[in-house]
Image: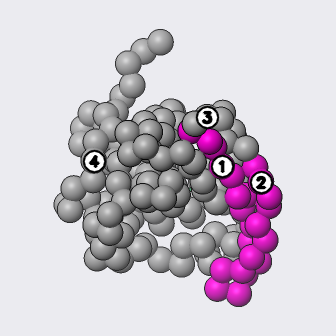
């Protein structure tokens, strides 16, 4: 197997604008593979505010970034102290190349290092298979509304004990 074309590192403040844009492009482009135009528009109406991205990354969670050899950000994911995985996003140009699974693997290792006993996530249709491949099971489908638009994802969890 060839070496990965990226490294996983921790978030730095200078990443905020790139993560804000990546979130938007990922939701709009990759999200559209499994959700309707109305749903992805409600999911990500506009690029995120970099200040909000930075505030979230500074609230005690760990945010990991996949960085390509040329310094581009290929994806990011985050883990909250209670074992909740909040965001996991790949850049559309990097999707399907192992970025998401490498980020998830690193988040699992971080959770183990913290002594967490359980991980949980609300996984999109795009992410469900990836989480299943890394030992998560679905507890139920979640149907809800975002900005008045019906959408769904899956409550998934993995025991670490
Ligand atoms: C979820 C996500 C991070 C996975 O990242 P990834 O690096 O593409 O992960 P993988 O390489 O394991 O591929 C995941 C799936 O995308 C499929 N895929 C392959 N090529 C792809 C491409 N060019 N573009 C998009 N998806 C592709 C894979 O076949 C795989 O499908 P499966 O899980 O049904 O088998 C990515 O799909 C993404 O950013 N989605 C939009 C945001 C999102 O839904 N986040 C999840 C919130 S919990």
Q: Which residue is mark 4?
A: 10
Q: Does dot 1 land on a helix, a strand or a loop?
A: strand
Q: Tag 3 or tag 1, which sits nearer the N-term?
A: 3
Marks 4 and 1 sit apart, C-alpha to C-alpha, by 24 Å
Marks 2 and 1 sit apart, C-alpha to C-alpha, by 7 Å
| Magenta region includes residue 129 | no
Whether tag 1 and tag 3 are in contact, CB under 8 A, the answer is no
What mark, if any, has residue 134 been given in the picture? Answer: 3
| Magenta region includes residue 147 | yes
Marks 2 and 3 sit apart, C-alpha to C-alpha, by 15 Å
Q: Which residue is mark 1?
A: 157
Using the image, determine if residue 137 lies above or below residue 30. above
Magenta part mainly helix, strand or loop? Answer: strand
Q: Quadrant of residue 47?
A: bottom left
Marks 1 and 3 sit apart, C-alpha to C-alpha, by 10 Å
Q: Residue at x 38, y 45 (%)?
A: 114
Q: Label 3: how many residues lie within 10 Å, few (<14), some (14-19) or many (20+)?
A: few
Residue 138: image x %, image y %? 75, 49
> In the drawing, does residue 25 fall left or right of residue 34?
left
Q: Tag 3 or tag 4, which sits nearer the N-term?
A: 4
> In the drawing, does residue 64 fall left or right of residue 144?
left
Marks 4 and 3 sit apart, C-alpha to C-alpha, by 21 Å
Using the image, determine if residue 56 lies above or below residue 145. above
Answer yes or no: is residue 126 visible. no
Marks 4 and 2 sit apart, C-alpha to C-alpha, by 30 Å
Q: Which residue is mark 2?
A: 139
Q: Label 1: how many residues lie within 10 Å, few (<14), some (14-19) or many (20+)?
A: many
Magenta residues?
Answer: 138-160
Q: Tag 1 or tag 2, which sits nearer the N-term?
A: 2
Residue 60: image x %, image y %? 32, 63
Q: Residue at x 48, y 47 (%)?
A: 116
């Amino acid at each position: 197997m060839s070496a990965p074309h990226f490294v996983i590192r921790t978030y730095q403040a200078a990443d905020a604008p790139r993560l804000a844009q990546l979130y938007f492009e990922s939701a709009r482009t990759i999200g559209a593979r499994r959700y309707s135009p109305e749903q992805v528009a409600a999911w990500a109406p506009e690029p995120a505010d970099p200040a909000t991205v930075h505030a979230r990354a500074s609230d005690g969670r760990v945010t990991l970034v996949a960085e390509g050899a040329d310094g581009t950000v290929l994806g990011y994911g985050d883990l909250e102290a209670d074992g909740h995985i909040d965001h996991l996003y790949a850049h559309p140009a990097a999707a399907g190349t192992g970025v998401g699974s490498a980020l998830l693997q690193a988040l699992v290792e971080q959770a183990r290092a913290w002594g967490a006993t359980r991980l949980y996530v609300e996984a999109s249709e795009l992410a469900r298979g990836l989480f299943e491949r890394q030992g998560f099971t679905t507890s139920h489908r979640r149907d809800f509304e975002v900005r008045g638009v019906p959408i769904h994802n899956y409550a998934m969890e993995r025991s670490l004990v």
